[in-house]
Structures are given as structure tokens and as C-alpha cells.
Image (tube, helix red, strand yellow):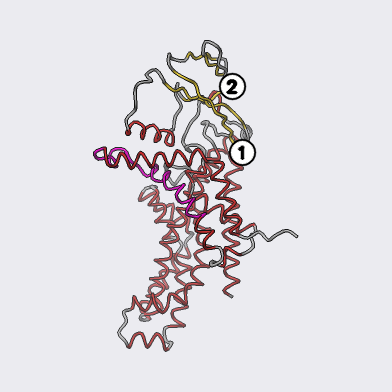
Amino acid sequence: MIRKFYIWHYVVFITSAIFILRFQEVLNSFTLLYYSIVCFFTVENFFINYYSFSQLDQILSPIILFAILVLVILKRNRWKFLSSRICFSNAMLIVLIFTFLLTPLIAPYNPNLQFNLSVSKLLSPFSSKKIGLIVDYSDDNYTPTKIEKYIHFKSIFEREVVDENYFLADSIITSNDINIYQRNTEITLPNGSNLKTQNALFIFGTDEFGRDIFSRLIYATRLSLFIGALAVGITFILGLILGFISGYFSKLIDGVLNRFTEMLVSVPTIFLVILFLAMFGNSLMVVIILLGSAGWMSLFKIVRGEVISIKNKNFITSSKLIGMSNWKILINDFLPLLLPSIIVNLVFQFANVIIAESALSFLGLTGNHLYPTWGAMIHQGQFYLEQAWWIVLLPSIFLISTLIVIYDFGRKFELKEI
């Protein structure tokens, strides 16, 4: 009889697989952490002049990986959901969480890294090439400083372009006179230099600029989930506060807010978002604020109705008599009762935000962000459907799978509460 496969088994398997497959990346991250700490104490204004969010993100990823592994093993018998049977939606949800938290560790390359086009343009999935790295050993007696070592490891993670010392080739052959042959192009190694080679497997192929699609999809997943989470947070705050004000206070306030909400509901949300994007620009924060502000109306209706039905209960009256503020009454008395309905609504709003963001980025209305989005990748791939169908298909699969998981989670939570 096959043993039951629980969620905590699956999490341990995923963390172990990431650690094994990305072992060198983990080592480089901890090395970068070491030199960051050393340089912090030895280099003046180190964080101001050298540090960035991407480096912090890279360093935190393996730490989070080990923290998840230890926490799951220690809490597997105390947290009930860890002892639940694994299913498709749970497995996909865990993959999405890992992708969001461990993006730099999972993605093999910088999402903006453009390999030399003569070799890397529009490679099909599972294409294999060679990466050549020329290392200069001309001065063996020279010992690099700590800051130079830090910059070296930093460049490994932040590399966005190829040059004469880092390139992609169909094959690399070194002869006795140390020449390199890259697609019939002969490159002579400088004196005292050495050539390091490694295999490069492009699981999902490359795009028209020679960028690794798998890495771009991983970062696009994080960005979409990040936008969805922040937008849903704004929706939660607006819907909860306005719904409470409408249902708890006078009929005049209730009438004004209710009519205003119905007016907004009658107008297609996408048109309002496009209008405000045209007025205020399409930066990332503007997109998040607009998407969050465009979806609070349904939550407003839910909170308002629940507050009206609860506000005359004895425990609410008791809270008023002992002098509790309206804010404390909302947090302590109303919110615990409203939370199940709010969570269900926000889960579906989360999916709606992801759809809206993908549609806007497909139309080119969300601007050029540092990292790619699913909609932007689909938009770029539509011009290469005949030569490179995978550029459109793969982000579409990621998008649809994410929506299925979110909707399934929302339905299960809704049925559980019912």
C-alpha cells in the first residue's frame, strides 16, 4: 500500500530539489552575503554606493529556503494543513508561493540578460548551448580586495549583457594554441587567460532578444502576484472602511455612499482604469493603486450588508456603552465575523486583478517595468507565432494555471465556510 503523500512531504521535496539543482547558486548567494557583511564594516558608504534591492533579494532567497524547510519539519504535526493530502490545486499553490519567495534562486538567469543573438535568438524549448567565460590569470600574485570580490559576485547575479569575456556558443573547442571557435568565429585568448565552459539548457527556449523565457516567466509570476497582493490590500482597506461607514452610521451617509458605489458599478471598470492611466501615467504604483481602487465595490456591498445586520446586536451595544471607539468596534467586533466573507471576496478579486493587469500589459498600458509581465510577454510573442509559438503559449499556460488555482482555492474556502 502506497503511503499517503501529505503537503509537508511535498514542501520538503520541493525545497530539497531546489537546493540540489541550484546548489552553486546557493553557495554564491552566501558568498555574496559574506562579502556584503565584510564590506559594510570596511567600506565607507557601502550600502549607498554599491547595494541594491536585487542583491538583498538574492541573499535572502537561500535563507528563506532553509527557513521554510526547518519550519515545515518542526511544525508538520502542529499545523493541520501541513498534514492534509496533496492535490493538484494545493501543489500548484505551493509552487506559486515558492516562485514568489525564491524567484532569484529558481530563475537560472537574469530575466533581462540578452545572449548574443547570432546563437540565442528564438531557441526552441530544451535547446542546449555552451557558455564561455574567459578568466584573466595574467597576474597570479595579485590578490583582489574584498570590495573587488564583492563586485565580482554581484556581477554574476546582475549580468544583463554578454561581452568578449562571457558569450554563448553552439560549441566551444579549444586547440593546443588555445583558440576558441564560436560558430566559425575564431577568438584568441589573451595571454595568461583561461576558458571556463558550462552547459546552458534553455528549458522554455528563448525570445526574439535571446533572453531565457523560463527566467522571465519566473519573474513575471512574482510581479503579477505582487501587483495582485498589493491591489487586493487596497481593495480590502477601501471596501472594509467604506462599507462599515455606510452600514454603521446614519442613513444619509449610507444613501450617498450606496448611490456612489452603484454609479461606479454601472461603468465598466476597464474604461475607468484606462482613463486614469492616461491622466496619471502608467508607473507600477499607479497601476497597483488603480487596480486596487477599481474593485472595492463588491466588497463594500458585502461589508455594508453584514454590518447592517449585526450593528444592533447586544455585544455591539455593550461595546458602545463601555466607551469603545468606532475603530475598535470595527476591528474587535465586526471584523472577526466579516472575515470569512471578506476572504472569499478578496480571493476572487485577486484573480480579477491578475486578469486586468495582464490585459493592460498586453495592450501596452502599464509601461516598461524592470521585470516582465505575462501580458507583455504574450504581446511580444504574437509577432513570432509562426517561428516561436512557445513565446505566447508558455506565459498563457502560466496565467491560466494561476487563475484556476486561485478560483479553486476560493471555491473550497467558500464551501468550507458555508
Q: What percent of the width, then of the height, locates residue 290? A: 41, 56
- Identify the residue position indicated by label 1 in the image: 390
Q: What percent of the width, then of the height, locates residue 80? A: 57, 67
**Image quarter for residue 206?**
top right
The magenta segment is 43-69
**Above or below: residue 119 compared with residue 106:** above
Kindly check if marks 2 and 1 are in contact, taking CB atoms under 8 A apart as contact: no
Q: Which mark is residue 17?
A: none
Asked if one can make out residue 118 in the rendered structure from this viewpoint, the answer is yes
Q: Nearer the viewer, residue 85 or 252?
A: 85
**Callout 2: 10 Å neighbours few (<14), some, many (20+)?**
some
Q: Nearer the viewer, residue 181 or 1?
A: 1
Q: Nearer the viewer, residue 129 or 264?
A: 129
Please, what secondary structure does the residue beneath circle 1 have?
A: helix
Left-right relation of 25 to 383: left
Magenta region includes residue 52: yes
**Image quarter for residue 123?**
top right
- Identify the residue position indicated by label 2 in the image: 171
Left-right relation of 343 to 319: right
Q: What percent of the width, then of the height, locates residue 71? A: 50, 58
Q: Main secondary structure of the magenta part?
A: helix
